[in-house]
Image: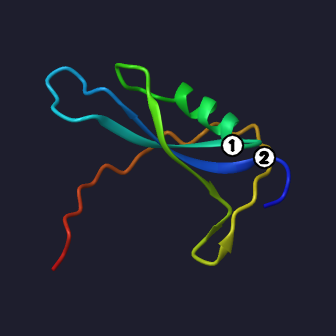
Amino acid sequence: MTAGPHLYAVYLGGDPAPGRLTEDHEVVLVVADGVPAARRRARQKWAGVSPPHVDAVRVIDVVDGFAVSLSATTEPETASVDLTYEPEIP
């Protein structure tokens, strides 16, 4: 892995929201210069009701045979999320 900023996927967890029986979890993407910085930045993106903990961190540098590279931009982050439920097809 080369020096400089990298894209990280961070798996966050937190106490259950009121009325829930299990922990809440979410994956957030951050750009950071290393794992400790990625952990800090990811915690800032947590939307849960309690302080989060970090369950896992992974650098995203190659996906399905494609190298992932970063370049600075002034464009805002994409806010849209596809929440379509897609059950497993037998």
Q: Quadrant of residue 52 in the image?
A: top left
Mark 2 secondary-structure assignment? loop
Q: Residue at x 76, y 53 (%)?
A: 70
Tell whether label 1 touches label 2 (CB within 8 Å).
yes
Residue nearest the viewer, comparing 40 with 30: 40
The dot on residue 5 is 2
Q: Nearer the viewer, residue 63 or 22?
A: 22
Q: Quadrant of the N terminus?
A: bottom right
Relative to residue 11, is residue 59 depicted above or below? below
Please name the residue shown 37% across and 25% down the image.
48
How far across and how far down the image is residue 90, in percent? 15, 80
Seen in the picture, residue 49 relative to 9 is either above or below; the reply is above
Q: Position of residue 81 (x, y in %)?
A: 41, 46
Colour scheme used in the picture? rainbow
Q: Of the residues shown, which amino acid type is indicated by label 2?
A: Pro
Q: Residue at x 18, y 75 (%)?
A: 89
Which is more toward the observer, 89 or 82? 89
Label 1 neighbourhood size at 10 Å, few (<14), some (14-19), many (20+)?
some
Residue annotated with mark 1: 31
58 versus 65 height, above or below: above
Give the left or right position of residue 54, taking residue 71 as reference. Answer: left
Q: In terms of sequence position, does the residue under pointer 2 or pointer 1 come before the other?
A: 2
Residue 73: x %, y % from top left:
77, 42
Image point (15%, 32%), residue name: 21
Left or right for 70, reference 7? right
Q: Amino acid at mark 1?
A: Val
**Quarter-wise, where is residue 24 in the image?**
top left
Disc 2 crowd rating (10 Å Cα; few below 14, some 14-19, many 20+) is some
For marks 2 and 1, give the CA distance. Answer: 6 Å
Residue 23 rendering spot, x and y as whole percentages: 28, 34
Q: Nearer the viewer, residue 75 or 36?
A: 36
